[in-house]
Amino acid sequence: MQVKIDTKEKFTVVTPIQPELTANIAAEIRETASKQLYQPVKNIILNLSGVAFVEDAAASLLSELQQYFYENNASFVICCMQPSAEAGFSGLALLEMMNTTPTESEAWDIVQMEEIERELLDGEDMEFAAG
């Protein structure tokens, strides 16, 4: 496997260990991440700190994967992108649509805020007594 996986309480951190994120590695990440949707801990943080180059096909695949996670009420946050890797997403006009953060700690915060938001929205159907 060309990724390191670290499961925490509310999310799993997936970190590619190759400096180049190819379509094949992105497909491996998609397979690993998609399995998480059926686990108790289904949120993913993709740490790209060690990635210097992202192939166009890989960037597109990760953008689609992130959208798939949000459609399934789970978070998928990308963090720690190097400027050269970020350029791969920007060149395809994907970066503006994606949930990215500069640090893993900020990604943790986003996942936790989105979890709270989903809990509140799930409780939206509750009726409150007028006072």
Image (cartoon, grey):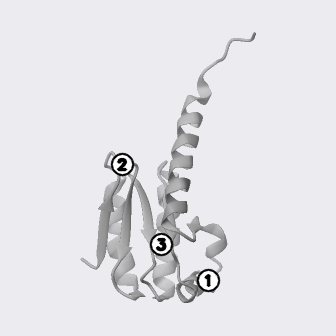
Which residue carries the number 2 mark? 9
Residue 124 locus on image (x, y percent): 61, 29
Q: Is residue 78 left or right of residue 2?
A: right
Disc 2 on helix, strand or loop? loop
Alpha-carbon span between mark 3 and mark 1: 12 Å
Q: Answer yes or no: do the residues labelled 2 and 1 have beta carbons within 8 Å?
A: no
Alpha-carbon span between mark 2 and mark 3: 23 Å
Mark 1 or mark 2, which is nearer the start of the sequence?
Answer: 2
Tags 3 and 1 touching, CB below 8 Å: no
Instruction: Write down the residue under mark 1.
Output: 92
Read off the residue under disc 3: 62
* Residue 46 % position (x, y): 44, 68
Q: Tell me residue 90's x, y (percent).
A: 63, 82
Residue at 48 percent across and 60 percent down: it is: 76
On the rendered image, what quadrant is the N terminus found in? bottom left
Q: Amino acid at mark 1?
A: Leu
- The amino acid pointed to by label 3 is Leu
Extreme residue in the right direction: 131
Tell which of 111 and 65 is nearer to you.
Answer: 111
Mark 1 residue crowding within 10 angstroms, few (<14) / some (14–19) / many (20+): few
